[in-house]
Image (spheres, rainbow, N blue to C red):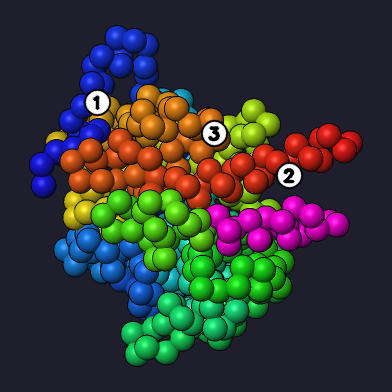
Amino acid sequence: MAPQWPEVGLDVEQLRTQGFAALPFREFVVKIHSRCNLACDYCYVYESADQSWREQPKTMAHEVFRRSCGMIAEHAQRFGVPQVSLVFHGGEPLMVGHRRLETYATDARRIIEPVAAVKLGMQTNAVLLDDEFLRICDALDIRLGVSIDGDRIAHDRHRKDRRGVGSHARVVAGLERLTAAPRRLFSGLLCTVDVANDPVETYEALLAFSPPVIDFLLPHGNWTAPPPRLPLDGSATPYADWLISIFDRWYHAPVVETHIRLFDSVLELLLGGLGGCESVGLAPMQLAVFETDGRLEQVDELKSAYHGAARMVLSYKGNLLDEAVDLPAVVARQIGIEALSEACRGCPVHTVCGGGHYVHRYHPGTGFLNPSVYCADLLKLITHIAASVRADLESA
């Protein structure tokens, strides 16, 4: 595929002459296992255009993991980063087994913590989560996020195992173990939006687990592979309508039942803050991904755009992280409004929307210099949230 923006059209040298300085990586996704025990039909790793997972070792070798941690420590020291986040990911990370996970977490703390504090996390489907994994997570302070899409019908529509059997009962069993463990280990739930499901029923099914945070993830799509039921002409806004139903239920509840990352971020941005969600806002992205073979890549949701979209062209002769911060693809995630299309810059909510999730902007030829495929939905959602806040302020 011919190079597209930002590989072509973004002049990093010119940005430097204008005062831009690359920011270091602070968040690291480490793929300790490249396969999964489920076969979710919307998975951007296994079911999308990029099939590079087939080239990856199933499990990250210990020496590769230690070398990756060494790079993180050196990078943090060079840039004076006081704290980093390291998230065990996959595939399904629990497939590495108890002893490997314990060794990885121990090595991460041993290698990185003399330089920077380490927040360890994991994203899991919880099917394999047992008492021994929870013991390890408790001992080494690994926070767990769990992927679940609502009640049994909603969840099992997409999140089946390789035999075609729904996984909801097994995920719930894992979640029940997690919620019985020390509260600090539970970092939250991730739910992929399906507009075929009732939004409030989905929210309340998730709320039953008393999660500290819920992430509602818009299905990954773009201008050539649009999300389900989304008209590209903006004639309907099914995702905004779905999310607004949840927002109204959440925002007007008499007590704070949980945090919803997308809504919290929009509210913070409307009030002049930076937000804390890569789906909205203009805050710089400072995240890198280590694959199981040690290869460094961009955020892996890019795999939904085209084959090779997440790859970084690096020399592999020094610290990959130090080299990667100067790549156009990385710089593009750090320059805020300068990475937005002209259409986005003319939008009244562009400082809140931020062009939407970078992954959802892809169009062949213009690359990622486009509005989000969810443009109309984001405009409607943000406008609705702003109106709700305005009404509260006026009545106060």
Mark 3 → mark 2, Cα distance in angstroms: 15 Å
Label at residue 349:
3
Q: Earlier in the sequence, mark 3 or mark 2?
A: 3
Residue 229, by quadrant, is bottom left
Circle 1 — which element? loop
Mark 3 closeness class: few <14, some 14–19, many ≥20 residues within 10 Å: some
Task: Identify which residue is drawn at 46% across, 86% down.
Answer: 166
Residue ID for mark 1: 10
Q: Amino acid at mark 1?
A: Leu
Q: Earlier in the sequence, mark 2 or mark 1?
A: 1
Q: Amino acid at mark 3?
A: Val
Query: Can residue 130 be seen in this snapshot?
Result: no
Task: Identify which residue is drawn at 43% across, 77% down.
Answer: 158
Q: Amino acid at mark 2?
A: Ser
Residue ID for mark 2: 388
Label at residue 42:
none
Q: Quick check: 309 left or right of 188?
A: left
